[in-house]
Image (spheres, rainbow, N blue to C red):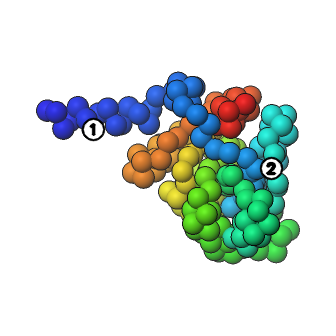
Amino acid sequence: MKKISVLMALSLILLVPASFLLAQSKPLAQPPVLLTSCGQSPGPAMIKVFLQKLNIEFELNPLATAANLQQKKAASQPYGSVIIVMGASLKGMGAAGISIDDEIKRITQLIEEAKKEGITVIGAHIEGMKRRSQGASAGDTTDEQSIDAVAPNCHLLLINKDGNSDGRFTAIAKAKNIPMIEIEKNVDLMTELARIYGR
C-alpha cells in the first residue's frame, strides 16, 4: 500500500500546475539561450518574440550544431540553455536543402554536447496539433520523428496543450521523468518563459 502511495505521489508531481511548480523553485534555466529547431518549422520565431520582450539574451540559429556550443565555451561565453522547437516543415527543410534525417543527426549531436557541457535542454512543441502528423499530408511522419528525437532527451518540456490532446507528450514525460509545462494560449508561453528564466 505504501509503495502505491509513493507511485501516486510521483505521478502527481508531473501533473501539478506549472505556475505552482515553478513558483516553488529557483529559475529552471539560465541565459544566454541558443534557440533552434528540429524540422525547420516556424515555431522558433514565436519564442524569439517573447524572449525579446522578456529581455532574455538569446541567439536564434535554425541550423545550430554541437560545434556552436563548443565555440561559445571556448570563447568563455557558454550558453546557459538550449531551446529546441519540435515540429517539421517540409517547406522549411526544402528551403534549407536538408532532410529530416539531417535534422535528427544534427539535433542528436547538439543535445549530446549540451548535456556534456551541463547546458539545460528545453524541448518545445508550441504549434499545436496542426503541426503534428495528424494535420500533415498523408504519409508525412516528419513531425513525429522530430518529437522522437527531442522530447525524450530533454530536461524540460514546454508543450501546447492542443498538441498533446492524444497524450503523446504526457506519456514521454512520465516514462522519462521529465517535468512538463502545458500552455493553452500564446500569451501563456510568455508567462512560462518568464517563470523558467526567473523574470
Q: Residues within 10 Å of mark 2 (few under 14, many from 20)?
A: some
Q: Nearer the viewer, mark 1 or mark 2?
A: 2
Q: Where does residue 37 sit, x and y in percent of width and height?
A: 72, 58
Q: Where does residue 145 sit, x and y in percent of width and height?
A: 58, 63
Which residue does the numbered mark 1 point to in the structure image?
7
Q: Classify residue 169 as left or right of residue 40.
A: left
Decide if residue 171 is in sight here. Answer: no
Which residue shows up at 58% across the image and 58% down it? 118
Single out the residue that lies furthest toward the front.
76
The label on residue 65 is none
Q: Amino acid at mark 1?
A: Leu
Distance, label 1 to label 2, CA atoms, is 38 Å
Which residue shows up at 74% across the image and 51% down it? 33
In the rendered structure, which disc, 1 or 2, sits on the residue that comes first in sequence? 1
Decide if residue 153 is in sight here. Answer: yes
Closer to us: 85 or 34: 34
Q: Of helix, strand and loop, which one carries label 2?
A: strand
Q: Amino acid at mark 2?
A: Phe
Closer to us: 54 or 78: 78
Which residue does the numbered mark 2 point to in the structure image?
58
Residue 66, quarter of the rendered image: bottom right
Relative to 137, say whether 68 is above or below.
below
Which residue shows up at 67% across the image and 52% down it? 81
Relative to 143, say whether 30 is above or below.
above
